[in-house]
Image (cartoon, grey):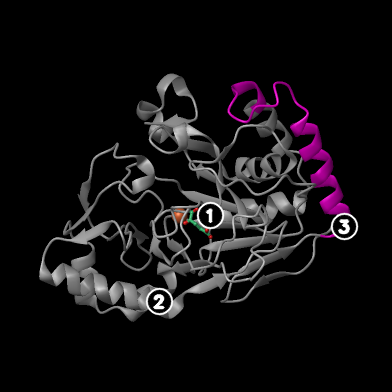
Amino acid sequence: MTEIGPITTTLEKESIYLDLDVRQEIKRLAELLAETVPGLLDEPHWLAAARDLSCALPAALRTALRNFSANSGQAGVIQIHGLPVGPLPPTPTSRESVERWATVPASVIVLCAMVLGEVVGFEGEKRGALVHNVVPVPGEERTQSNAGSVNLEMHTENAFHPHRPDFVALSCLRQDLDGEAGLRVASLRRAIGLLSAEQRRILAEPRFRTDPPPSFNGSGTGVVHGAISGAPEDPDAQVDFHATRPLDEGAARAMAALREALEAVCDTVYFAPGDLAIVDNRVALHGRTPFSPRYDGHDRWLHRVFVHADSRRSRARRNGGGHVVS
Ligand SMILES: O=C(O)CCC(=O)C(=O)O
Ligand SMILES: [Fe+2]
């Protein structure tokens, strides 16, 4: 049986370094999937093949992902290093960029995501595509979207949505040349102990409102909700520091304290090509540092995939039982 390198479960983060033979096996499976008819990521037949092949991933990788899905740990994020990328075209620069073709890197992220559950897209976001390109877009620099390059505020992904992703997978195809762009991740599991009982009580009350982000092109409606919910000692988070508004002064103070606590425990991930980070969107928030795109074909390029751990829950919002949530 193949082995993988050290699994470090430090308080910092969980990082997995793949051995050469494991990497070769993943590459073989990704190439096989990339060649699977019709070679289109959003097709049910291709997705079925991806699901089957994800079961054939090297056991050590599957084990790490399966354990992460059961308990994402204090950090709420896992990093896997050394995945295949292959030759790349220039980094796209268009708005709403998505991957529709089953390339090797798109196949890799879908294979890993399928171990955690079902991949999903949102009708109001990038036309429901399952694999998104996270790239800087000219003219979008100052937007609070993943096409921007100013500081991207910490957020629960699609915080307004009742079926927001359970996991957000981000893989790196190309890193930014200046090494400035970092994925920021802050776990509520680490931050919760920094808040008073009174702050936690307020945060759990429906005193916050979140509207859909700009990427949803104005579709969807806002919701009033608690910023934290569930087990008091290990709550879920539902907050976007750009899109969520406190509805009264007490809520504003509690939200500011939450922000400070999350900042105090925040970690920054600087990707290299072949790195994959998976954020547990229930317990960790993420954002991005500012950086300086050049739009010369060599800019930072990530793929992004959303996962539902239990896709049955969103069935009423998935037309025809497909992978796109309304
Ligand atoms: O660019 C990044 O590192 C993360 C951007 C982001 O929040 C996202 O794509 O969901
Ligand atoms: Fe995000």
79 relative to 101, above or below: below
- Residue under label 2: 263
Residue found at x 46% / y 23%: 321
Residue 41 is one of the magenta-drawn residues: yes
Kindly identify which residue carries mark 3.
20
Find residue 136 and name its label.
1
Residue 248 lies, in percent from the top left, at: 11, 65
Q: Residue at x 18, y 70 (%)?
A: 252
Query: The residue under label 1 is which amino acid type?
Result: Pro
**Nearer the N terminus, badge 1 or badge 2?**
1
Q: In whole angstroms, how far apart are the C-alphas of marks 1 and 2?
A: 24 Å
Residue 288 locus on image (x, y percent): 48, 65
> Disc 1 or disc 3, which is closer to the eye?
1
Inspect the magenta stretch and tell me whether residue 69 lies in it: no
Q: Which residues are magenta?
A: 19-46
- Where 152 sits versus 51, above or below? below
Circle 3: element type: helix
Q: Tell whether 151 sits left or right of 274.
A: left
Mark 3 or 2, which is nearer the eye?
A: 2
Q: Which one is in front, 65 or 35?
A: 35
Q: CA distance from mark 3 to mark 2?
A: 36 Å
